[in-house]
Image (tube, rainbow, N blue to C red):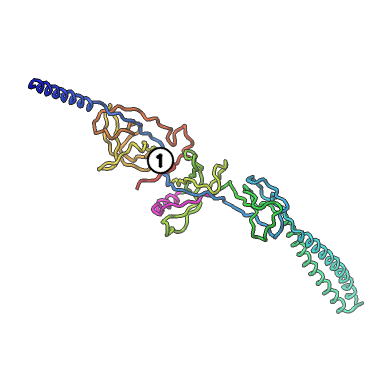
Amino acid sequence: MRRLLIVLCVCTLCANVFSACGRSKSKERPAPVVTAQAEMQDAPYVLNTVGTIKASVSVNIKSKYAAHIKKVHFVEGSLVKAGQLLFTIDPRINVFADQQAGATHQRDKVDFEQLERDRQRYKVLAEQDVISRESYEEKNTAALRARNAMRASGAGASLARQNLSYNTITSPIDGRIGAALIDEGTFVKDKDDILAVVNTTTPLEVSFALPERYLHEIRKHMALGPLTVQAAAPGMESHPEVGVLTFMDNQVESGTGTVRMKARFENPEGRLWPGQFVTVGLVLKTVKNAIIVPDRAVQNGPQGTYVFVVKDGKADMRPVTVGFRLYGALVLEQGLAAGETVVVEGHLRLVPGAKVEATPMQQAPAPGAPAAPPAEHQAAANATKPE
């Protein structure tokens, strides 16, 4: 029994020794990390929010008169031109009114012409003292009265022709027409029922609002020239539509603490659509030769933000100053140089000087890279300056 206890103690001691050796070896094993390189490129500083697309001109098509819709002449959702026929209505009373006004004008015109000829004859006779001056004055007054009656009936005939033209309803603008809200044969009320809506799609406006804390900075950059605004619907973040800031409200909304703004977009390809909610980015400036790293590389510590830089197979802690966010990346103001390798994943096992086993991250082309769209189209979908 005594020998058995001695053997067990020896085995336990050996196991502890081997375990300690294994732990010491594991401490020396390099920590697996994922790394990326800091890049240098021009980076736009963008204030982002959500906005709404609006047609720069929107027209409700209505009838001037209560009548039945006789014919619909357009294809729903199609592009229409100014002056294009949209609806024909059937107020027959306008036809009769036009005929009556025209006949009245012709009668008054004939009466005036006859009285004018009489006036001219009486004028000659009065100058020759063949007739009295009073007789001439009577003819002159009758001719003036007939002329005024002709003018009045002429205006009435023009008004009747104008009213008759309202039997056909045309588009007042170039744009895209929506659905026909009234079917053929339907009776529409005078000036109440909307028949269709025509919206301009090129250009468009984007309405949005930004917090008042950015007001001073926005006004400072507006004084230097027009500001670029970018709008991106879902799926357009890497290549947003580019427009110009056209309006900033003259007051801060007391209920929300925001300033309302508008931007104009030419929208030549029709990628934006009235009523859409889009990500809007107000580009205040472009930082030249900025240092950019993936946002996961930057960590927060008691002394501020830092990154782990990999050099000669070891990790070195480096304090950095963050400027602003750009896509899934951060622009650093100081602390890092272009080309340096930083840790993106695996920070929990790192201490200054720790050995690492680095695996490069598969990096997508960053904004502004040669393979990406033009630099002016590269604002971040959520680029906001850290508070």
Magenta segment: 205-224
Q: Residue at x 63, y 45 (%)?
A: 77
Furthest-right residue in view? 130
Q: Position of residue 32 (x, y in %)?
A: 30, 28
Query: Residue 210: percent from the left, percent from the top?
Result: 43, 52
The percent position of residue 306, horizontal first and vertical second, equals 29, 39
Q: How many numbered marks does the figure carry?
A: 1
Q: Amino acid at mark 1?
A: Leu
Which is more toward the observer, 333 or 153? 153
Q: Quadrant of residue 130?
A: bottom right
Left or right of 156 in this view: 340: left
* Name of the residue lying farthest toward the front: 1
Q: Quadrant of residue 310?
A: top left
**Front-most of residues 87 and 280:** 87
Residue at image position (10%, 23%) is 5
Look at the picture and state if 12 lies above or below 343.
above
- Rendered view: 116 above or below 185: below
Please name the residue that numbered disc 1 is placed on: 326
Q: Seen in the image, is 65 located left or right of residue 290? A: right
Residue name at image x 44 percent, y 34 percent: 369
Task: Answer whether residue 278 is magenta in the image.
Answer: no
